[in-house]
Image (spheres, grey):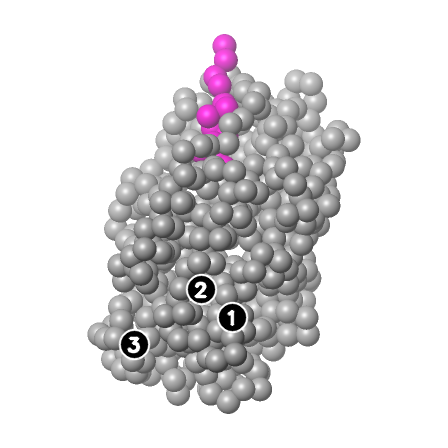
C-alpha cells in the first residue's frame, strides 16, 4: 500500500474524532438504595450492573434464565485447555472498552492476533467450483471484476482502485452522518442515501471494488448478507474509524483483529466474581411477567424453588426484544411502537464438532455465497480454535506463499467451530435440522468422521427494518430511556456486537443521576 494513500485516508478519517453526537435526552434519576433489577446476565447486563455499582447504587440484582452468565458469549473449554467460542468471538482495534475491562478484571485473558490476510489462514470455497482460493485472492478477484477493464489490471492498479474506494467510502459516510465517534450513528437527514441494501449501496456509490472486504467484515460476523441487510447497519458497523484501523494495521503488517486466549465468557464471569459484594446475580432464574404500578415494579420469576415475585423500583431490560422477551404488561402506546414490534433477527447456529484433519488445513474455511436464498442453513464457515490461538502468525506468514505446515497442531483429530445462518427468527427445530445439514456438508468438505460436541442456536442480530429505521426508533428509544422507571440495553437497542453494547452502556450511565 502506498504511503500516500495510507496518509490520505488516516488524515481524512481523523476528522471523525473532532465531533461527537450531542444528546439532549433527559437524565435518568434513581435513589442510591433503589432496588434495581436487571433482566439478563449477558455482556450488557453484567457490564451495566458494574457501572451502576461504580456510580454508587447499592441494591442491584441480575436475573439470568440460563445456568451461567455470558448470554451470547458462550465459551466451551477444550480438554487441551484452549477455548472454543460459540458466541462472541473477535475484537478489533476499536474495542478499547473490552481491552480496559480485560486489564481490570481478567488480565491473563490476553489478545491473540487473528489475521485472515496471511497466507494459509482463511480458505474460501465455492459450490460447484474446482479447488479453492485464499482470502487475499478472493478480495483481489472481486476488485478486478468490479474494475471491468478491457485488459486485466495490474496489481498496482487494483491496489490503487481499492484505496481510492476506501477514501470515497469515508467521504460518503461523512456526508451522510457527519463526524461522530463510533456508536449509534446520528439520524441521516436524507434517508434516500441509505434506503437500500448494503450491496445496492456499494453499487450506487461505485464501491464494488470493496465488495470482498465488506462481505468478510459483515457477513462472516453473522450480520446477514449484503443483499438483505439495510445499508444503514453496514455503515454503522464499518465506521470510518474501523477503516482507519484496518488501513493503518495493513500498512505495517500488524494485526487489527484479535481473539481472547481464554474466551469472552471468562471476562463476564471474572467481573461477577470481582463485584460479588456490589451486586447479586441469580442464574436459572427466568422472568415470566413484569407489571409496573405507580409505586413498585412486580417481577414474577421461576427458579428452582418455584414461582414467586421480586419487587423493584427500577427495571433494566438486557435481553433480546425480538424473541420471547417478558415485556411489561402495561406498555404504553408509545412503548409498544418502540419495543413490541422488533420482529427481525437471524437464526445463527454455532456448532463445535470434531473430525479427522482435512486434506488442506487452515484456520478458517469460508463459503461466502452460502447463507442466502436457497443456501440458508448450509455450512458457511469453520474455525479451528487450536490453530487460531496457538499458531496465529506461523513462519512465512507474510511471504505470500501458502502456509502448508502448521506443525503438530494440525495433526490428529481436529476440533472446529461451524456456523450456519438463516435470515429469519429462530424456529424450534433449527438445532436438529441444522445438525443434519452440517454433517452432510462436513462430509462433502473433507471433514471426515465428524461428530458434534456442542451446539448453540442464537437468535442473532435483532434489528429494525427500513421503515422502522426511518421512523427513528433507535433514537426514540435513546430519548425514552428511564421512562416509567425502565431502561433498555443490549443488542436489541444498539447493534449485535459487544463493542456497541458496552459503548451504549457507557453513554447511558452518564445520564444516570442519584437523587435524594
Distance of label 2 from label 1 (alpha carbons): 8 Å
Tag in front: 1 or 3: 1
Q: Are marks 2 and 1 in contact (CB under 8 Å)?
A: yes
Q: Which residue is mark 2?
A: 161
42 is higher (above) or lower (below) than 56? below
Kind of element beneath mark 1 = helix
Residue at image x 43%, y 80%? 133
Nearest to N terminus: mark 2 or mark 1? 1
Q: Position of residue 120 (x, y in %)?
A: 34, 77
- Where are the magenta residues, as a range? 501-516
Instruction: Say which mark, if any, is on residue 147.
Output: 1
Q: Is residue 175 visible?
A: yes
Left or right of 35? Residue 166 is left
Q: Is residue 215 visible?
A: no
Instruction: Say which mark, if any, is on residue 320.
Output: none
Examine the structure image and report whether residue 161 is included in the region drawn in magenta.
Answer: no
| Quadrant in which the N terminus appears | bottom left
Residue at image x 46%, y 79%? 152
Kind of element beneath mark 3 = loop
Q: 46 or 173, which lies in front?
A: 173
Distance of label 1 from label 3 (alpha carbons): 23 Å
Kind of element beneath mark 2 = helix
Q: Are marks 1 and 3 in contact (CB under 8 Å)?
A: no
Q: Which residue is mark 3?
A: 400
Residue at image x 60%, y 49%? 232
Q: 405 or 183, which lies in front?
A: 183
Tag in front: 3 or 2: 2
Distance of label 3 from label 2 (alpha carbons): 21 Å
Q: Position of residue 468 (x, y in %)?
A: 71, 43
Amino acid at each position: 500500500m502506498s504511503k500516500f494513500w495510507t496518509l490520505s485516508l488516516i488524515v481524512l478519517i481523523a476528522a471523525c474524532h473532532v465531533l461527537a453526537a450531542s444528546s439532549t435526552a433527559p437524565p435518568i434519576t434513581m435513589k442510591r438504595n433503589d432496588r434495581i433489577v436487571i433482566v439478563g446476565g449477558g455482556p450488557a447486563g453484567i457490564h451495566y450492573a458494574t457501572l451502576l455499582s461504580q456510580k454508587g447504587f447499592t441494591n442491584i440484582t441480575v436475573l439470568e434464565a440460563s445456568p451461567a452468565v455470558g448470554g451470547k458469549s458462550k465459551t466451551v473449554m477444550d480438554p487441551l485447555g484452549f477455548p472454543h467460542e460459540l458466541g462472541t468471538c473477535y475484537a478489533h482495534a476499536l474495542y478499547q472498552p473490552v481491552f480496559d475491562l480485560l486489564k481490570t478484571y481478567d488480565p491473563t485473558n490476553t489478545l491473540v492476533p487473528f489475521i485472515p490476510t496471511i497466507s494459509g489462514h482463511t480458505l474460501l470455497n465455492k459450490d460447484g467450483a474446482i479447488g479453492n482460493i485464499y482470502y487475499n485472492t478472493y478480495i483481489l478477484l472481486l476488485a478486478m471484476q468490479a474494475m471491468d477493464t478491457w485488459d486485466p489490471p495490474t496489481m498496482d492498479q487494483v491496489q490503487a482502485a481499492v484505496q481510492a474506494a476506501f477514501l470515497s467510502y469515508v467521504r460518503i459516510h461523512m456526508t451522510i452522518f457527519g463526524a461522530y465517534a463510533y456508536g449509534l450513528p446520528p439520524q441521516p437527514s436524507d434517508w434516500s442515501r441509505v434506503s437500500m441494501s448494503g450491496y445496492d449501496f456499494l453499487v450506487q456509490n461505485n464501491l464494488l471494488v470493496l465488495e470482498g472486504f465488506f462481505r468478510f467484515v459483515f457477513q462472516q460476523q453473522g450480520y446477514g448478507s449484503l443483499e438483505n441487510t439495510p445499508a444503514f447497519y453496514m455503515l454503522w458497523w464499518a465506521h470510518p474509524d474501523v477503516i482507519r484501523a484496518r488501513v493503518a494495521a495493513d500498512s505495517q503488517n500488524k494485526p487489527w483483529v484479535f481473539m481472547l486466549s481464554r474466551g469472552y465468557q471468562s471476562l463476564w464471569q471474572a467481573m461477577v466474581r470481582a463485584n460479588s459484594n456490589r451486586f447479586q446475580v441469580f442464574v436459572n432464574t427466568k422472568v415470566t411477567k413484569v407489571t409496573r404500578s405507580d409505586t413498585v415494579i412486580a417481577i414474577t420469576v421461576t427458579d428452582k424453588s418455584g414461582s414467586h415475585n421480586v419487587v423493584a423500583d427500577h427495571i433494566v431490560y438486557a435481553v433480546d426484544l425480538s424473541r420471547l422477551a417478558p415485556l411489561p404488561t402495561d406498555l404504553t402506546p408509545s412503548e409498544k411502537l418502540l419495543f413490541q414490534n422488533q420482529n427481525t433477527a437471524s437464526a445463527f447456529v454455532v456448532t463445535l464438532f470434531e473430525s479427522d484433519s482435512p486434506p488442506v488445513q487452515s484456520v478458517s474455511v469460508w463459503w461466502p455465497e452460502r447463507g442466502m436464498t436457497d443456501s440458508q442453513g448450509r455450512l458457511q464457515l469453520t474455525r479451528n480454535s487450536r490453530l487460531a490461538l496457538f499458531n496465529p502468525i506461523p513462519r512465512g506468514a507474510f511471504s505470500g506463499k501458502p502456509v502448508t505446515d502448521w506443525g503438530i497442531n494440525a495433526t490428529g483429530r481436529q476440533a472446529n467451530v461451524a456456523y450456519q445462518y438463516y435470515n429469519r427468527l429462530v424456529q424450534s427445530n433449527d438445532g436438529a435440522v441444522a445438525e443434519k445439514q452440517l454433517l452432510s456438508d462436513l462430509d462433502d468438505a473433507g471433514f471426515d468422521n465428524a461428530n458434534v460436541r456442542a451446539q448453540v442456536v442464537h437468535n442473532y442480530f435483532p434489528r429494525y427494518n427500513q421503515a422502522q429505521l426511518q421512523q427513528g426508533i433507535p433514537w426514540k428509544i435513546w430519548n425514552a430511556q428511564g421512562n416509567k422507571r425502565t431502561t433498555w440495553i443490549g443488542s436489541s437497542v444498539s447493534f449485535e456486537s459487544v463493542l456497541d453494547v458496552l459503548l451504549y452502556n457507557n453513554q447511558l450511565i452518564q445520564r444516570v443521576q442519584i437523587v435524594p
